[in-house]
Amino acid sequence: MNYDIKTIAKVINGKILSSQLDEYCKIKRVLIDSRKIEVAFETIFFALKTTKNDGHKYIKELFDKGVRNFVVSDNSAIENIDRAANILLVDNTIESLQKLSEYHRKQFDIPVIGITGSNGKTIIKEWLAFLLSKHKNVIRSPKSYNSQIGVPLSVILIGEEHEIAVIEAGISKVGEMIKIEPIIMPDIGVFSNIGAAHNENFVSLSEKILEKLKLFKNSKRIIVSSKYKEIINTLNSSDEFANDPKNILFTWGQKNSDDLKIVNTKNENGSTLMTLKNQNDDIYKINIPYIDAASVENALHCFAVMYLLNLTDNNTLKLFNELPAVSMRLEQSEGMNSCTIINDAYNSDINSLSIALDFLSQQKQNPKKTIILSDILQTGLKSKELYSEVNKLFKERQINRLIGIGEDISKSQECFESVKEKDFFLSTDEFLKTDIRTLFSNETILIKGARVFEFENIFKKIEYSSHQTVLEINLNSLVNNLNAYRSIINQETKIMVMVKAFSYGSGSFEIANVLQYHNIDYLGVAYADEGVELRENGINLPIMVIAPEKASMEKLIKYKLEPEIYNMQSLYDIIGVVNKSKHSNPAPGGIKIHIEVDTGMHRLGFDEENINELISTLKNQPDMNVAGIFSHLSAADNEEEDFTNFQIQKFNKLYEKIADSLSYRPLKHILNSAGTLRFPDAQFDMVRLGIGLYGINTTNNKLLNLENVISLKTKILQIKNVRAGDRIGYGANTIVNRYSKVAVIPIGYADGFRRNLSHGKGKVFINNTACLVIGSVCMDLTMIDITSIDAKEGDTVVIFDENHTVNQFAKQMDIIPYEVLTGISRRVKRKYTFE
């Protein structure tokens, strides 16, 4: 993108409120997220208003960081900034972003492939980019940018160097695709398939199909598998297309009438060999390194595109055997020597690099940021231009160390003037010959490489070794759940997230980093040591400590933690430490404390009869600042509504009594995750979210569609054939009554897979099939019966995930979900994924 502000104003029909800068200065970048500035002076910020946030809140912050070009829909948002900026006022900033991208698309006369459907869009897009890159300079949507906002951001990335574009589009309701179509304007359309996703927003399947088909209203060809009759029938009966549907439809399948007919398929050694022929009986053979039906379908869509583009030479056909496994997720895990590893080792282009660098920037646990980067291939840019642009990204993200691997990046060393530590290697093998495990210590390392460089071998070398049982935490789903709660929480109400007990077993600073990045207001921990760990890993949010012990009081002051005070003794303890330390280490404004009152749970908290003594003591403590007054609900997740309302009424009374004695109003909060759903009138100044963020709804309230966040998986270590009459496991009290296949998996009661799951009470899942525990659960290992399924050593075993929930697993052990998550030992490897 390279437009001046006058051109942008004309394109989006924006009223120029202020234009005190050079109105012909070139704007090259669009920004919608205030946390992701790359080059401030050449950026224009669109202040988007969505159900989850309002970009206008961040204009002053961006101005202070050097951004000088803004598109707004609320002119009151610019009152507090210096008018030395270009400011455009529009009715709707999302629609304006779409108008700009539509204008940008029209500047390029290149083939565009548009992809829609229920599933497979992103895989098809990535595979097409891989296949086409051998012939042309390709631009594709980053990751899964396919929404009303994602599509415009994708199209704006098209540049003069690009020769073909592959853009995906997703919708969730009627009226969305008609806005996306003129932005993409695809010449060739791919309709991947049709399924149940977003059915709730359409009155019928045909309505959903017709809405998706609107993407192709001006396309020359539309590719559909003939097995999806509903798509073909809807297309043929529609009058919304510029061309006759019969002339633009291109089908593949097993029918003689198909433009490409599948003659034969054969699975062999983990691959699928397919023979196809066209209407002229020309034969084509492709082999793909996958055997699952979805991959076969996706590959055939890709072949159809290549066929229509006349790119079916032998070299291209051979590329199908190299179709890469598409990882749309960054994976974060623990590395050697106290490092954190972010693995994105399967693709490298400047757009996905920017996304990965954003994720790297969120990590505060290590001050040192390192990137291992391969050559960036097939950009169409000259090396100096490309790596100078990459250097800009590094400078903005304050990258400390670069290890460049590849001939091109090695020749461009001088471009990386912003990085202090630099080492270059011509190949991955050359780098692996170094003593790699001693090269890194106390740093966060992003591994980012094109697939041909096989950076997964680097990841294996520096990842911290542990057994094969893994707790996967999906950070996207965590954020989606946070935003789901935000949609029902009053805009002025603050959010505290409880990260006690290792964030319910999911990690400490890893979760806190994400929450800090997404602007929550408070964190809550149980003990001071948990708060200290967060502070030492770069977390600067306010942190409330629920159960401060007398021995930890000095740490509270040193690390600026805010203790809960629940009785007079805890108040006297903190007063003593404050008086002792205020001369040598005075806290500006005094130490902040939180007062808990007992409203009926009878755990911690001041009883009503102690409130007068509390007030009297606080009046004599000028160095004590009451940051909040709160209580705990004991039955917010069940049907005891009368008791919960009683607690809320009592809390109101006690809060007012304490607050009236102060010269200010402390934060007032009583709701947990369940209470936030069921008692919205009691949101007050802040709510406290906990297990709900992980997708676990402990109520019957269906207000939020929460996503699963945590999955526990392991691998089959060994398979044994056991004869009828043989005994299995400790105690020798399980005797099989038939020939059986028994798999041994590396998880036991020391990992949180409890012993009471023994003898068929517990079950796990292989290929979505339940397998019962056989014999007794051991400390480190468990045996399962796999007689009735096809499985091999190394196969994945699911303990719980989005399809087999934590709630269901908890019922097997007769415990609650909280116990499941907090009971997973720290020796189980945590892997964090982010799309």
Image (cartoon, helix red, strand yellow):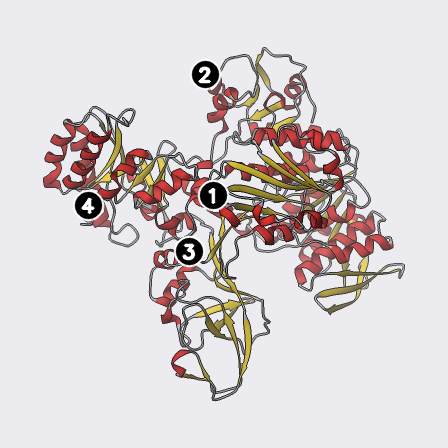
Image position of 786 (left or right of 284): left
Point out the residue furthest to the top here.
20
Q: Given this view, does label 1 or label 3 mark the residue nearer the observer?
A: 3
* On screen, residue 55 above or below 606: above
Residue 449 visible in the current orientation: yes
Spatial CA distance of label 2 from label 1 is 30 Å
Location of residue 376 in the rendering, given as x and y in whole percent from the top left corner: 71, 40
* On screen, residue 53 above or below 506: above
Q: Secondary structure at mark 4?
A: helix
Which residue occupies the foreground of this view, 766 or 284?
Answer: 766
Q: Earlier in the sequence, mark 3 or mark 4?
A: 4
Amino acid carrying mark 2 in the image: Asn
Label 2 sits on residue: 80
Image position of 781 (left or right of 578): right
Q: Secondary structure at mark 1?
A: helix
Label 3 sits on residue: 826
Q: Earlier in the sequence, mark 2 or mark 1?
A: 2
Asked if the residue at tag 4 contacts the one at tag 1, i.e. Cβ–Cβ closer than 8 Å, the answer is no
Asked if the residue at tag 2 contacts the one at tag 4, i.e. Cβ–Cβ closer than 8 Å, the answer is no
Spatial CA distance of label 2 from label 3 is 48 Å
Residue 240 visible in the current orientation: no
Spatial CA distance of label 4 from label 2 is 44 Å
Label 4 sits on residue: 646
Amino acid carrying mark 1 in the image: Val
Spatial CA distance of label 3 from label 4 is 40 Å
